[in-house]
Image: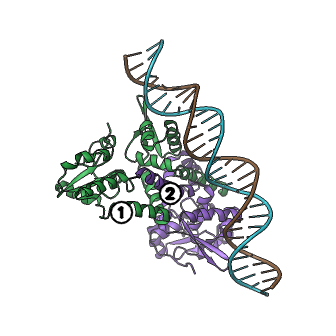
Chain colours: A purple, B green, C brown, D cyan
DNA sequence: CTTGTATTCAAGAGAACTATTGAATACTTG
DNA sequence: CAAGTATTCAATAGTTCTCTTGAATACAAG
């Protein structure tokens, strides 16, 4: 009856998952992966890491089963393993938000100044979009949009928003979304649109949460 | 618009919480704390760590807001900060269980051999206990029992179970519980009772989950 | 079969983490 | 106020993590 050893062994295994969450770069990779599968190269590009370093982080995540790899041609595509990983990330965010003062300060000072209107709820958005009351704007990069998006959403990456400003009707409400509750793309987009006198709001959370809440999507993986 | 820095700063903060979960001893401390508040000395004792080491781990947990400290007399009592911390721990366990082969193997080989009957569900237990159909057995140490327990439960720590075997009716079902889904105390107790021909089962999960599911408790903190 | 591309492997420097030890602090008790 | 207790602090050695660099592998295309 070596319960002590068994128990410690079990906690050691749990700690391996914790360790995977203990590095900012890995968390960032996980956030990108929450959008859908990605190649190593693509992940290295968006995260600003070297390819070798990205590969090493991904292997750590794979060792604890949080992501899986699929090889197609020359490229290796990584993807999150199941929705419970997204739930874990959300739990982590929750705890950090409610208990770490720095996070609160960061979010307060940086985000709320740009977003003083309440974000729109998912189900509400679906309803209004179907009635043609709002324009749904996906500000993520094109590849992410192509991999799946909210039904009826149009895609204008943040960098190109400036060029398309004149195609919006100032009286028609725009709802922007991107990768998740702390993805700044949507915040920046809303700020930019409001500067131009548009009625813009953010969607609560982002696309990963849209998926996990079981709402319909459009586009998708080949 | 230094979104990149802001974003990385945010992930760095999240990673602090992940780091708190990256050590087996800290996870074990968190499990004990899920039972209720505990002094440093008590935690050091159950975890087998030195007092100084325990104190350091607790301070790390406090820095990320997962636990809080309260001083009373000579002792400092630590407690979990809110139920979202328990949720985070459960998420971590979920991911580890479903994705790490070693965990599965550990649980399979060590626990299922001892527990081939399905564990009883919480709401079902409450119902049956009220009708007097089952004896609810709390096998945690006395101090933990005193700090709060399932209504009507009797307390016999595992070490003393042997002495009290004759007070059970072999025809009357016994449901044992302890600290959580992987606490081995209840498994060992059920194994021991069955060896003696008793009808014994485990409660699903443990006392922390009982609390978070909003069911009534008995006894409590002074 | 040779070339090019995407990814992984391997080694190493520097930083961070962990447990131990012994001293320091804060508080209670007599 | 002196003695005792619970906890924290500080320093340290050994281990582990992280990133970089350059080479190795696997595969596709020509």
Residue D28 in the image: above or below residue A79: below
Q: Could you say which is closer to the camera, residue A3 or residue B23? A: A3
The local secondary structure at tag 2 comes to: helix
The reply to whether the C-beta atoms of the residues labelled 1 and 2 are less than 8 Å apart is: no
Count of numbered circles on the image: 2
Measured from the top left, where is residue A106 in percent x and y? 58, 50
Measured from the top left, where is residue B100 in percent x and y? 50, 64
Q: CA distance from mark 1 to mark 2?
A: 20 Å
Measured from the top left, where is residue A114 in percent x and y? 59, 56
The picture quadrant where one finds residue B45 is top left
If the image is split into quadrants, where does the N terminus of chain B sit?
bottom right
The picture quadrant where one finds residue A34 is bottom right
Measured from the top left, where is residue A156 in percent x and y? 63, 72
Residue A78 in the image: above or below residue B123: below
> What residue appears at the point 38 percent right and 60 percent down from the top-left corner?
B111
The local secondary structure at tag 1 comes to: loop
Q: Could you say which is closer to the camera, residue A197 or residue B165? A: B165
The residue that label 2 is drawn on is A13
Query: Is residue A219 rendered to the left or right of residue B116?
Result: right
Can residue B155 be seen here? The reply is: no
Residue A187 in the image: above or below residue A98: below
User: Do the residues at discs 1 and 2 belong to one chain?
Assistant: no
If the image is split into quadrants, where does the C terminus of chain B sit?
top left
Q: Chain of mark 1?
A: B
Residue A28 in the image: above or below residue A210: above
Query: Is residue B6 rendered to the left or right of residue B182?
Result: right
> What residue appears at the point 63 percent right and 58 percent down from the top-left corner?
A25
Q: Chain of mark 2?
A: A
Query: Is residue A32 rendered to the left or right of residue B193?
Result: right
Q: Could you say which is closer to the camera, residue B208 or residue A113? A: B208
Identify the mark at residue B113; answer none if there is no mark: 1
Label 1, residues with CA under 10 Å away: few <14, some 14-19, many ≥20: few
């Amino acid at each position: 009856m070596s319960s002590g050893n068994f128990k410690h062994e079990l906690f050691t295994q749990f700690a391996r998952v914790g360790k995977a969450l203990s590095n900012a770069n890995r968390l960032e990779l996980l956030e990108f992966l929450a959008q859908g599968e990605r190649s190593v190269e693509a992940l290295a590009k968006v995260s600003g890491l070297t390819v070798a370093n990205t590969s090493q982080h991904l292997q750590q995540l794979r060792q604890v089963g949080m992501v899986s790899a699929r090889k197609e041609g020359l490229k290796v595509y990584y993807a999150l393993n199941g929705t419970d990983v997204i739930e874990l990330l959300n739990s982590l965010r929750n705890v950090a938000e409610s208990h770490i003062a720095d996070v609160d300060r960061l979010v307060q000072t940086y985000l709320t100044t740009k977003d003083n209107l309440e974000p729109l709820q998912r189900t509400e958005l679906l309803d209004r979009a179907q009635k043609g009351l709002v324009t749904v704007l996906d500000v993520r990069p094109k590849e992410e949009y192509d991999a799946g998006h909210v039904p009826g959403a149009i895609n204008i990456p943040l960098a190109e928003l400036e060029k398309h400003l004149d195609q919006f009707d100032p009286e028609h409400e725009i709802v922007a979304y991107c990768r998740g509750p702390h993805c700044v793309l949507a915040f920046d987009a809303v700020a930019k649109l409001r500067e131009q006198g548009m009625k813009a709001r953010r969607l609560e959370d982002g696309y990963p949460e849209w998926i996990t809440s079981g709402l319909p999507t459009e586009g998708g993986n080949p």
